Image: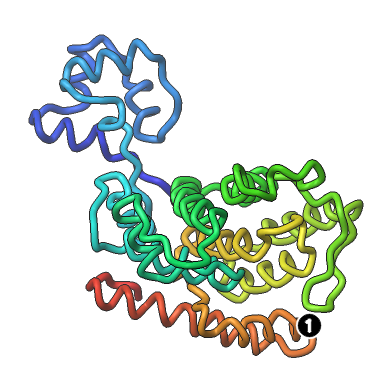
Amino acid sequence: MIKYDGLEKLLAQKSIKKTEMASLLGISSRTIAKIGKGEKISRIVIEKICDYFSCEPGDVFKKVADNHILQILRDEKEAKISGGLYHELQVRMTYNSNHIEGSKLTEDQTRLIFETNTIDVGEGVLVDDILETVHHFRAIDYIIDCAEEILTEDIIKKLHYILKHDTKDSTLEWFAVGEYKKRGNIVGGRETARPKDVPQKMAKLLAEYNAKQNITINDIIAFHSDFEHIHPFQDGNGRVGRLIAIKECLRHNIVPFIIEDSKKMYYYRGLAEWGKQNGYLIDTCLDGQDTFKRLLTILDIPFD
């Protein structure tokens, strides 16, 4: 559930009640109720309210999520706060997720790009490593923005597009940026879904996942494994899959997990053994959740 508390705060600042404001501005009580629910209202009404309070539309419709971790991320993202949870999630998630996939950028270089939009280029640094680092920052912004939305193929494809557009891969005619793969691929000696089977398998995976009630971290881990075994995109599946996991943890009020590059062999083993020994991947992801909890503890953010 999302609460819209912007109007309440503005009313409190003016020491006026909703009914008084409605009467003064000629707005119906039904329209005022729509604002509280986050429903659409006319542009004219929005302009009246903003003129009255001398504010912007975003001040009236500010979203407040029940998940306080998500709300902290949104507040810090909007205010561009340095050194907080949003800042550290961006740097640590981006560095580790990209490094697992072979990026040569160090954590310090990743941090420099995020903090200053510049880089001290070292020997052997690829342009795509830099591009995909910046793109990953934007992908994290996207999952923060759409965290409460039901997971869909459109969201998943959008994440792939954000990550891979403008890279060298995107110049290849057969590389489908933001779309499912056109060519088959084998990962770690393991077969993945054939291109013609991907749409059906992804639709089935999402339908079964979204039909679940009271989703747990184990459900999210299982979805992650199934997603990686389908391997729906030509490249970028690991990063997209780990971003989805963060989004779904935020959606279901679960402390997210970050897979550290130093644990990638345990992570790969967990994916390879899924279906025979699920505990390997579950333990690795729970270790990643402990990593996130330690960050919350350092920042004095409660999570129980």
Q: Is residue 78 above or below residue 25?
A: below
| Viewer-closest of 49 and 105 | 105
Residue 155 visible? The answer is no
237 left or right of 252?
right
Which residue is pictured at 72% across the width and 67% down the height? 228
Q: Position of residue 145 (x, y in %)?
A: 45, 46
Q: Disc 1 on helix, strand or loop?
A: loop
Q: Position of residue 144 (x, y in %)?
A: 44, 51
User: Please, what is the three-letter code of the amino acid marked with disc 1?
Assistant: Gly
- Quickly name the residue at label 1: 275
158 left or right of 12?
right
Q: Position of residue 112 (x, y in %)?
A: 33, 60
1 left or right of 268?
left
| Viewer-closest of 70 and 160 | 160
Which residue is pictured at 33% across the width and 75% down the height? 295
How many numbered markers are drawn? 1
